[in-house]
Amino acid sequence: MSSPSHAHHPAYVKIWAVLVVLLIVSVLGPLTGIRWLMLLLAFGIAVVKAYLVAKNFMHVNSEPRWVAYLLIICLALVIVLFAGVAPDVMKHRGLSWENRAAQQAVEAGSHAAGPAHE
Amino acid sequence: MSSRPIATSRTAAGLPTARLVTWWVIASEIFIFGGLLASYVMHRLGHPEWAAQAAHTHTWAGALNTFVLLTSSLFAVLAHKAAGSGDGARAARLLRLTALGGTTFLCVKAFEWTHEIKAGFVLSSGGFWSFYYTVAGLHGLHVLAGVIIMLFIAADAARNEELQRVECIGIYWHFVDIIWIFLFPLLYIAR
């Protein structure tokens, strides 16, 4: 049975409606033709939707505080992983090394995609 | 000695053991999907040519699946509410609707993959497609597992038994929903 801390239930249908409206906005984003706006809408809305689901559907804020800390620590460690590995993956050359396979893949892909992607 | 199962009674961590375990599962899943998504993002940023590959994914199928998962999450949380008030029959009905949402999601995914594979985009077609099939496939396996477990829990809930499990499968399902919320813009919108 649910714990007493979950006795208060928010208006789930209204939250679902907000989530669906946000989904529609993120799908319409590419129609603006503005790349930065499209990416901002898509990922900004994804963060908002994830927050709404975690808070209202998963009831993270009704759990003991350590549950939220646990999730935040896990996410922070993923960011540490990204920060540690990304420079070697995203850059294809450094002071004394170069990733020729990646450079060739970018070049071949850019030629195949045409001038718009170069 | 009490006959109540330990999953519903122990509260050493401030919450029942079943829910404690569910949160630990979620924590480990954050590393599984977080590592995979972090790898995808760093490769995607290093390979601008992947945008041309991503343009072949079906945005509307992805959007439909997002809608399906969001709606199934609503059913899952309503099932939790029903279980909280002791209405096992309603919780079971709502859980079965949630499972139907999961099944619909998998059917749409199968339709998408069939079209993509027929068009020649397979796991070995390049970096983007390797990530696409791995991430979406792993997520799909989580959806399938959730649907199967949910149907077992719904069968118990219909008899007003083990109602605490309704909330646990709900938490898991919402997490699967959150993962898709991030996969959708990464695989379908960002081009």
Image (tube, coloured by chain):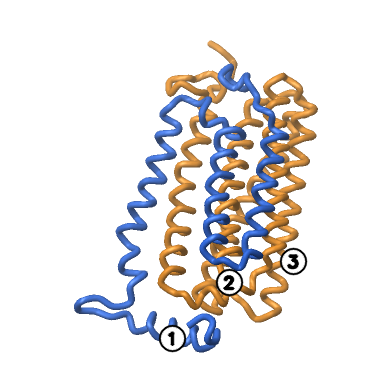
Chain colours: A blue, B orange
Residue placed under numbered mark 2 in the picture: B54
Q: In the rendered structure, the residue with mark 3 lies on which chain? A: B
Could you tell me the amino acid type at mark 1? Glu
Q: Nearer the viewer, residue A85 or B170?
A: A85
Q: CA distance from mark 3 to mark 1?
A: 32 Å
Task: Tell me residue A13's x, y (percent).
Answer: 72, 34
Amino acid type indicated by mark 2: Ala
Instruction: Specify the quadrant of the image occupied by residue B132.
Output: bottom right
Q: Is residue B89 above or below residue A101?
A: above
Seen at 71% across and 62% down, the residue is: B61
Instruction: Point out the image quarter for the C terminus of chain B.
Output: bottom right
* Secondary structure state at the residue bearing disc 1: helix
Residue drawn where x is 52% and y is 56% of the image: A40
Q: Nearer the viewer, mark 2 or mark 3?
A: 2
Q: Nearer the viewer, residue A28 or B139?
A: A28
In the visual, does A103 lie left or right of B120? left
